Amino acid sequence: MSYWIFVLPGLLLAVIASLATQATFRRYSRVRAASGLTGAEAAERMLRSQGIVNVRIERSRGFLSDHFDPAANTLRLSPGVYDSPSLSAVGVACHEAGHALQKASGYGPLGLRSALVPVTHLGSQLAFPVILAGMILHRPGLFQLGILLFAAVVAFTLITLPVEWNATTRAKRLMVSSGIVTPQEQPHAASVLNAAFMTYVASAVSSVLTLLYYLTLGGRRSD
């Protein structure tokens, strides 16, 4: 029962945030930007307005699979964003372009998040099996190792928050100054980004609550 007391609030928040993001994206995917720019064109214009011309912009697969790959210096946009001139598409594209600007300006938290990727991947794969093995085998050291692995995952979700918010803030400002959307359109495009940011908040809350559960469980086992 105690597991669900810790974890259920985070899961519910994640579901609500995901549904809100999808609903907001679909709502403004039916509203065409006055500039007529597609997501790919909007991202390119925003980057060029800041003197960035060496970032590749590619079409990816999947719904809202948009992301910036710092290692490849490549912006990958889903078909619904790459090809669409909607407010949703240009908002998402400009947000991802914001990550490219972060790299170009040497934004510290982005570099830290990138450095955490390998250990985070390891932690997400091994944390639960190691914790479970420690419990079954009654090996406190193994249990604590699992908690450390999961703590790396939590650290990643927390450092993601300022990275995503900073990219969103850049997008909100530059999509207007670059002529991608009008000042009247900006709040609508921004609402898509605000909803998407809440999914990262939900993920962070869920991760922190899960870690607290594991720590509490470890404390009870040591009594």
Image (cartoon, rainbow, N blue to C red):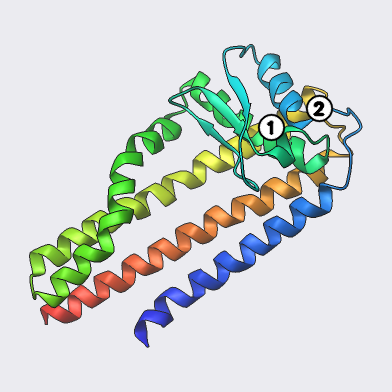
Report helix, strand or loop for mark 1: helix
Residue 202 placed where, x, y %?
Answer: 53, 61
Residue 44 placed where, x, y %?
Answer: 70, 21
Q: Which residue of the protein is positioned furthest toward the bottom in this rendering? A: 1
* Circles 2, 1 touching at the beta carbon (< 8 Å): yes
Mark 2 burial class by Cα count in 10 Å: few <14, some 14-19, many 20+: many
Q: Quadrant of residue 216?
A: bottom left
Q: Which residue of the protein is positioned furthest toward the front in this rendering? A: 61
State whether residue 188 is above or below residue 83. Answer: below
**Dot 1 corresponds to which residue?**
94
Identity of the residue drawn at 29% across and 58% down: 150
Identity of the residue drawn at 28% across and 44% down: 119
Q: Quadrant of residue 139?
A: bottom left
- Please report whichever mark, 2 or 1, sits nearer to the chain's N-terminal start: 1
217 vs 26, nearest the viewer? 26
**Dot 2 corresponds to which residue?**
180
Identity of the residue drawn at 81% across and 44% down: 187
Is 9 left, or right, of 61 in this rendering? left
Report helix, strand or loop for mark 2: loop
Is 118 left, or right, of 131 in this rendering? right
